[in-house]
Amino acid sequence: MATKEQTKISKEVLFDLHRRMVRIRLLEEAAGRLASEARIPGFIHLYVGEEAVAAGGCVALKPEDQITSTHRGHGHLVAKGGQFKPMMAEFMGKATGYCKGKGGSMHISDLDLGMLGANGIVGGGVPHAVGAAFANKYKNNGLITMAFFGDGSTNIGAFHEAANMACALHLPVVFMCENNEYAEYTARDRVMAITDVADRAVAYGMPGVIVDGMDVVAVYEAARVAVERARNGEGPSMIECKTYRFYNHAGVDAFGTPYRSDEEVREWMERDPIKLFEAQLAKAKVLSEEQAKEIHAEIQAEVDEAIEFAEASPMPDPSSDMLTDVYTEVS
Amino acid sequence: MTVAETEERIIRYNNAFTETLAELLREDPDVFIAGEDVGRYGGVFQSFAGLNAEFGDERVVDTPIAEQAIIGLGIGAAAMGLRPIVDLMFMDFVMVAMDQIANQAAKMKYMYGGKAKLPLTITTTAGAGLGAAAQHSQSLEAWLIHVPGLKVVYPSNPYDVKGLLVSCVRDDNPTIFTLHKKMLGSKGHVPEGLYEIPLGEANVVREGTDATVIAIGMMVGEAEKAAEMLAEEGINIEIIDPRTLLPFDIDTVVQSAKKTNRIVIVHEAVRNGGIGAEIAAQIQEEAFDYLDAPIARVAAPFSPVPFSPALENAYVPNAERIAEGVRGVLHRSS
Ligand SMILES: Cc1ncc(C[n+]2csc(CCOP(=O)(O)OP(=O)(O)O)c2C)c(N)n1
Ligand SMILES: [Mg+2]
């Protein structure tokens, strides 16, 4: 991170970037622990390692802007203002969860926060970003939409159709790619003949930039440029963030998987986006190590409280809740 | 299968699948496999474990996340005379690829004057019960049996996995072969070597006199549990596993209906527009006069598959609900 750039960014923003990343990290570590203890049922796709992308992207947005998400959506919701209690409750399938226990980890969302939904279908959310951006333009409300998606999802038709349509209709969309080099258990180079997803942008007619996805300031800076373009009516942009998920595709195993080497995982962990940023903040005397610790402790307390809340919450009741929310009732 | 056979060689449902694929790859050089994560990693459920190592990247192909192109790859290669096995990781992704399946693969022969021959097998995994929520838990057989030109199979045990998979791959039509995710670890007798179970032949799993339960996939095992519960009450049910859902063996079902006069149909998909509706309609067309009670259906409520275990447990039909359904058709007539 160039300190020159940093001086252009207010302390407020730097704190915000830091806080959002730590909020994601601590919630995710807790979720992973609970999942491995079977206190959270089903699959869980953790965002640990990729925090700078969601935080850098969302800090560049207004609260009223919208985002779309993926199967790895916890971080996106936290970065968009998601609260721990209803998130934790949702992971556990409780009635007090954001989705009333019906969605779980893979469908975590809060439309009230402009988070249009984590998605179990790869690429499924990207076209929604185009639609949301269409509505923003239609209403002339000055808002924009940011689509988060993985490297793997750029291989599916829905992604290509959406990217082309957004450009053809000149819509206020930011395409935010999390290139973590793997789609599930398959390395990118086995299923793509290009190295950089950003190379695809030119084919649709939008700028594509590559940033270090472990550098939250770099992500934020790139997002700010793309968001401004979208807001000024200059059309879509694509940002490719080179990042890495520290844990397995699903669950909490970091090491000992057959499809990536422990050495590779360790190398990326050296570039932990939170540690990197905290070191920079300390060096620039913006946030001391001591102060960072306090923030972690404060957020951890909030996570612990959310776990208590979630565990004490009731399960949904099959006899009354099974068939609700299938349709909107005519009033 | 007989008792003597079950003593021979007990393996898992999932391993029966893997072993059969290996044997088919060895037997026929025109057979190849393509799908997401099926190569190096061996599939998300390890259903393809070891195949890439033995047969290489040319015959066990890792594909991008591209369900339409995966099915299309199979169609084009099949039209050129190969015998592709292409995988859709979860049955829910059938919808992503539905144009290639229903508009393309299923209709090619008919549209092109009978010249196209498509020995294409699509493998996939269905079923709820694992906390995988609305987009990774569905059973979509009803969507597929609506399409002329397809064949749809759904094995309920390891023996049938092998026999049906062999028949699918050797068939010259597009077939869809569905595993149940929750049954992957279940065990049963599977002989070594390849054998076929003809497509379109139902299996009478249990003979009985009081009512016939027609069950598919994981529901066959639940029906067997229900049979034990009901036997204690003096109720003796017959269980039929259609095995192939399209073409459907209506003759075996009608024979049974004429004997027991009472029918309960069980499936995991939602009741509305489910395969049970089609089976019930066919039974009443052929055996209306033999029925002593309205045909009952035990199926999922009309909602997406819920995530919460509290809801999902109540959502998926089980032995208890099947037994309840059987008691229902018996009480009505007595
Ligand atoms: C249409 C579809 N195909 C396949 C899957 C199974 N699947 C879930 S996540 C995933 C990999 C996604 O890779 P990427 O987009 O790079 O996201 P990452 O997991 O790396 O964050 C796959 C293949 C799916 N959910 N939906
Ligand atoms: Mg990826």
Image (cartoon, helix red, strand yellow):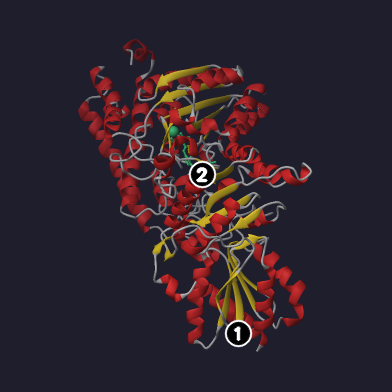
Q: Nearer the viewer, mark 2 or mark 1?
A: 1
Quarter-of-image position of residue A249: top left
| Label 2 CB sits under 8 Å from any ligand 1 atom | yes
Kindly identify which numbered label has been placed on residue B210: 1
Q: What's the amino acid at mark 2?
A: Gly
> Residue drawn 48% across and 81% down?
B229
The crowding category of the residue bearing disc 1, from other C-alpha atoms within 10 Å (few below 14, some 14 to 19, many at least 20), is: some
How many numbered circles are shown? Answer: 2
Q: Image check: B247 left or right of B178?
A: right
> Residue drawn 39% across and 24% down?
A213
Judged from the image, the secondary structure of the residue bearing numbered disc 1 is loop
In depth, the one of A56 and B161 nearer the eye is: B161
Q: Mark 2 lies on which chain?
A: A
The crowding category of the residue bearing disc 2, from other C-alpha atoms within 10 Å (few below 14, some 14 to 19, many at least 20), is: many
How far across and how far down the image is residue B17, in percent?
A: 47, 54
Kindly identify which numbered label has been placed on residue A120: 2
Inspect this view and state whether residue B305 appears.
no
Q: Image check: A131 left or right of A78?
A: right
Judged from the image, the secondary structure of the residue bearing numbered disc 2 is loop
Q: What's the amino acid at mark 1?
A: Asp
How far across and how far down the image is residue B273, in percent?
A: 68, 60
How far across and how far down the image is residue A52, in percent?
A: 38, 28
The answer to whether the residue labelled 2 contacts the one labelled 1, judged by CB atoms less than 8 Å apart, is no
Q: Image check: A109 left or right of A141?
A: left
In depth, the one of B197 and A209 nearer the eye is: B197
